[in-house]
Image: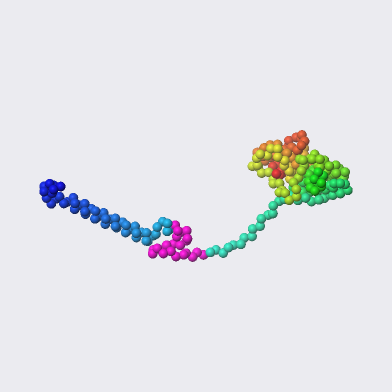
Amino acid sequence: MIRAWHADGSTFYYPLVAFVVGTVLAALVMGVAMGIVQLGLRLHGTDEERRRDDKGKQPRDAGGSAEPEVRPVAEPVETATTSAPPRVLGFETTHEFRDGSPFVELGIERETGRRYLKTPMSQRNGEWEEYYGIDLPEYETFAADATEAHGFATECRRQEHPDRWLFWPGARAPDPITIDRTRLAKKRAILLTDHPTNSSSVPVEGLPVGTPFVQIVGSAVDLDGNVQARLPAVDSPIVSIAADQLGL
């Protein structure tokens, strides 16, 4: 270094001067940049402050203060909403036979229109009454002959007609089968009409008028909107019934 100083004279100081001047200029640039950043923060606030202000609905002014924004409040509008009560099974008595023991009652279920026979179950000491679906010819026969009614009731108490059993009063009423319903095979469906037809309104043959139940054979509704079914517990022909005439 001493040799360079003696050989180069005053030019030896040029690099030192350049270094000092560069350092000073860099410090000035950094100071200006930091000043700009601080000014921006003061004017606009930080991201966190803006998020907090937006959440609280309090916009920030140029001085950084937050004033609550008063927004008009809409008056609540009262709307009359009435929900229909759920559809449940209800039984209307039309005939009573109390000349024997146990008694027998005939009637019509209001939601489905199916006819029924009600009798107490002897194995339960008469404390529980059960309902069994009957078709129109059976209903007319039992209404005209109490002996026939008691005979069928005895068969019910011996559990000979489990496929006729109806749900109790207050149970959910069956809903019509929709065309997108699947996994229907072997389900017992209740008929919602005395005179069922297929989707083309052609009467279904082979079912007694007022048949209460059928057993579904197909697993889904076919392309025509029909369900394949037959009478339960007997070897009867398979018929096609419009899906919306069957309830599950």
Q: Name which residue lies at 86% across and 46% down.
A: 101
Q: Name which residue lies at 85% across and 47% down.
A: 103
**Left or right of 84 in this view: 108:** right
Give the prevailing secondary structure in the magenta stretch: loop
Query: Is 63 inside the magenta-drawn segment?
Result: yes
Q: How is the image coloured?
A: rainbow
Task: Provide residue 181's location: percent of width, then percent of height.
Answer: 65, 42
Q: Quadrant of the C terminus?
A: top right
Picture quadrant where residue 67 is located: bottom left
Residue 202 can be seen in this image: no
Residue 94 can be seen in this image: yes
Query: Is 136 inside the magenta-drawn segment?
Result: no
Q: Give the answer, above or below, for where 180 lies relative to 81.
A: above
Task: Provide residue 232's location: percent of width, then percent of height.
Answer: 75, 38
**Left or right of 68 in this view: 35:** left
Asked whether 197 or 35 is in front, the reply is: 35
Q: State the extent of the magenta-drawn residues as a range.
A: 51-72
Q: Name which residue lies at 32% across and 57% down.
A: 34
Task: Provide residue 187's location: percent of width, then percent of height.
Answer: 70, 40
Task: Provide residue 58's location: percent of width, then percent of height.
Answer: 45, 62
